[in-house]
Amino acid sequence: MPDQSLPEARTPESAVREPAVDPGTGRGVSRRALLGTAGATGLVLGATGGAVGYAAAPARATPLTSVGTGRAVFHGKHQPGITEGLQARGHLVAFDLAPGAGRKEAAALLRRWSATAERLMAGEAAPHDDTDVARDAGPSSLTVTFGFGYGFFGRTGLEKQRPAALDPLPAFSSDHLDRTRSDGDLWVQIGADDALVAFHALRAIQKDAGSAARVRWQMNGFNRSPGATAHPMTARNLMGQLDGTRNPRPADADFDRRIFVPSATGPAWMVNGSYAVVRRIRMLLDDWEALSRTAQEQVIGRRKADGAPLSGGDETTEMDLEKTDAKGEYLVPVNAHARITRPDRNGGAAMLRRPFSYHDGIDADGTPDAGLLFVCWQADPLRGFVPVQRKLDRGDALSPYIRHEASGLFAVPGGAAEGEYVGQRLLEG
């Protein structure tokens, strides 16, 4: 892609008259470095009420790193944002169609959104009224994913095209749902490895909605930044646990069958699509952190340090559910979260977990409003999320430490071909 290095900042001639010299090396200091150092020192002076202060020199100007140059593809068999790796920053936003808006307005909106997503994912400016927020950045692995909620089909006169798999989720005992932050006619998932790139996309999508749709709810999340660990590893959640050890992998022989809608089932417009279950799960961190590490590991069924099952081995070792200690007690407790969620304990139910952590501040009583923006993908939620959550409802040791506060289920159609927009086969079929 074209060079996107920052332009030189303009400075009055009186500000820099003589070449500066680094006293440590005897070499000249670049104009950019000099200006950056001056700015940093000015901040120190302001903070100390005029006292002389020194600040570290800024990093030298470098080309875009691998984080900035990462690029996902918009057009394809599946929509982006499903099989890509976890991104450092995410935004989830649901819209309701405006009163009077129907199929025609929805088609125009998806056409605008698709054009915007394609350009932004390529590291280009939005098609119109770009805010310049991401002007200096590369694509940063940006993905934008679109889905339809249950109410969308009634508002657009497409009830006959609504898939049975989109029927509302059943109630669960762990639910404490805020309906104002649940469901929605349209759902957009935005992820990127740079916070400004992600926000830029969020703002562009919101502006593109215009008078056709209004925001119903919006949530912000994050994951560990690429390169923050010495080697790639399974992400940790805010409880400190490795989260996603047994995720299905694209290399698995049955991956597509479990995650994507096959041509033999469901409406034609959903072929190669998937269903996203979205849950805002608050973690009761004060209660969780009061437990000893041993107690936390008993709740999960895995070692906190490396994710290995309590039955032994490393993170990838198959869990031995029958292994006992000297007293004859199971090493992996019968109510451990990792035991209950195993596919072989749930009729083969499997889902691809692709969450973001969130932190929305501190409540008046000092309790952190933090947890997981849980997003999971499956070919059929009635065979993926629902049986597992029902099983968890009946005795998961983790349940006392979490609370499901918002929920949504969305049909995410297959990817758009070149020249198409997402959802075109539904809206123009």
Image (spheres, rainbow, N blue to C red):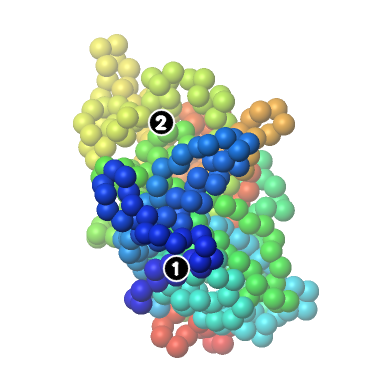
Q: Which image quarter is the N terminus in?
A: bottom left
Circle 1 sits in a helix, a strand or a loop, which is it?
A: loop
CB within 8 Å, label 1 to label 2:
no
Q: Which image quarter is the C terminus in?
A: bottom right
The percent position of residue 208, horizontal first and vertical second, equals: 63, 75
193 above or below 43?
below
Mark 2 residue type: Ile
Mark 1 residue type: Glu
Could you say which is closer to the camera, residue 4 or residue 217? 4
The disc placed on residue 70 is: none
Q: Is residue 31 left or right of residue 164?
A: left
Outermost residue toward the right in this view: 99
Q: Is residue 207 left or right of residue 141?
A: right
Q: Is residue 140 visible?
A: yes
Identified at 32% across, 17% down, the residue is 329
Q: Is residue 426 visible?
A: no
Mark closer to the chain start, 1 or 2:
1
Outermost residue toward the top in this view: 327
- The residue tagged 2 is 300
The percent position of residue 290, horizontal first and vertical second, equals: 52, 20
The percent position of residue 263, horizontal first and vertical second, equals: 39, 75
Mark 2 crowdedness (10 Å alpha carbons): few <14, some 14-19, many ≥20: many
